[in-house]
Image: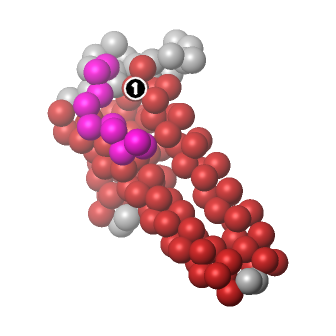
Amino acid sequence: MAERELALYSAKIAEQSERYQDMVEEMKKVAVLANEQELSVEERNLLSVSYKNLVGSRRASWRILQSIEQSESAKGNEKRVAMIKKYRAVVEGELDKICHEILVRSRGSDQGPGSPARGFGESKGLKFCD
C-alpha cells in the first residue's frame, strides 16, 4: 500500500473511532504526499470532516461555558465567573488556532515547499469557522 493510501486509510480509521485530531494529522500527510496534485473529492471531504469536528466540539464547549457563565453571573458568583471566563478564553484560543490553520492551508499562504497546503487547491466546504 502506498504511503498516501496508508495515510488516507488511517484518516478513515480515525474518523470511525471519532479521533478527529488524529484524522487531521493523517489528512495533512495525504496533502503533503499529493505533491502538485489536487486532493480528490473524497480526500477533500475527509479533510473537511476532520476540521469540522475539531471546530464543532470546541464551539459546543464554548456555548456551554457561556451559558454556565451567565448562570453564575446571575447568582453573583464573581469568582466562578472569572474562572469560567479564563477557561472560555482557552477554548477560544484553540478555536482561533484551528481556524487560522484552516485558512492558511486552504489559501496556501505562510507555507514553504512540501507543506500540507499543497493539494488543497480551492477547498470547498471549509466554512465552519464563521
Which residue is located at x 52 percent, y 34 percent? 101
Asked where in the image residue 20 lies, by quadrant, the reply is bottom left
User: Could you tell me residue 115's position as x and y percent?
Assistant: 50, 21
Relative to 118, is 130 above or below? Answer: below
Q: Nearer the viewer, residue 49 or 96?
A: 96
Q: Main secondary structure of the magenta part?
A: loop
User: Could you tell me residue 102's position as x and y percent?
Assistant: 45, 34
Q: Quadrant of the C terminus?
A: top left
Relative to 14, is 108 above or below? Answer: above
Which residue is located at x 37 percent, y 33 percent? 30
Horizontal side of residue 118 vs 43, given as left or right? right
Q: Quadrant of the N terminus?
A: top left
Which residue is located at x 63 percent, y 74 percent? 69
Relative to 64, is 13 above or below? Answer: above
Q: Which residues are magenta?
A: 121-130
Would you name the residue on which mark 1 appears? 106
Q: Amino acid at mark 1?
A: Ser
Asked where in the image residue 128 lies, by quadrant, the reply is top left
Residue 116 visible? The answer is: no
User: Could you tell me residue 67's position as x and y percent?
Assistant: 54, 74
Secondary structure of residue under mark 1: helix
